[in-house]
Amino acid sequence: MISSYFLLLSRREREAPTPEVPILVLRSSAFESGGNIPQKYTCDGQDISPPLSWSDPPRETVSFVLIVEDIDAPKGIFTHWIIFNIPASLRSLPEGVPKQGEVEGIGTQGKNDFNEIGYGGPCPPPGSTHRYVFKLYALDISLDLNPGATKEQVIKGMEGHILAYGELIGRYGRG
């Protein structure tokens, strides 16, 4: 019983926060919320990031952070994408954001749990369907972090600076 408690506790500590703040509506033209992520955006396809768009944030917004997590991974939360310092003027990210640290006009990318910079698409074990949560945060600051920053560094930098939040959940399974 105690080991299950600590496993649950450590899993929650790794998950990006879900704050109680005003809502951002996050969408993708590639899939509906709760729907299946097309193969194109997975390890079984082109492994490129899907197009995303969102509603207007609070006017005090300076930047956005996007974190994508597999919340059904066998060993706990698995991070697929971290991109921060997305300009407050943007309301969308294009399909196929380049897998490099700094993407001009788009933002700075952190290191995912594949130990790579940029987007790493869904790639669950065969026989299971996983949920992938795209979490968008509006911040009142830009983060003073370098390309390749970890999720823990990004989360720490966001503390006390989240103005609004939105999420989009997609599913992907392998036969």
Image (cartoon, rainbow, N blue to C red):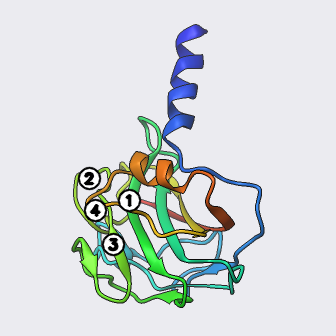
- The residues tagged by marks 2 and 3 sit, at their Cα atoms, a distance apart of 17 Å
Q: Are marks 4 and 2 in contact (CB under 8 Å)?
A: no
Closer mark to the observer between disc 3 and disc 1:
3
Query: Within 10 Å of the Cα at label 1, are there few (<14), some (14-19), or many (20+) other Cα atoms?
Result: many
Mark 2, secondary structure of its residue: loop
Q: Which residue is mark 2?
A: 114
- Does residue 107 appear in this view? yes
Camera-side residue: 10 or 43?
10
The residue that appears at 36% across and 89% down in the rendered structure is 105
Q: Which mark is residue 97?
A: none
Check disc 3 and give the amino acid type. Thr
> The residue under label 1 is which amino acid type?
His
- Looking at this view, name the residue that lies furthest to the top: 2
Horizontal side of 113 relative to 159 (left or right) equals: left
In this picture, residue 22 sits left or right of residue 48: right
Q: Nearer the viewer, mark 2 or mark 3?
A: 3
Q: Which residue is mark 3?
A: 108
Q: Position of residue 126 (x, y in %)?
A: 36, 50
Please tell me whether mark 4 or mark 2 is closer to you in this view. 4
In the picture shown, does residue 71 fall above or below 98? above
The Cα–Cα distance between marks 1 and 2, rounded to whole angstroms, is 7 Å
Give the mark nearer the N terminus: 1 vs 4.
1
**Reading the chain from its start, which is encountered first: label 4 or label 2?**
2
Q: Determine the residue positioned at 24% across, 63% down.
A: 117
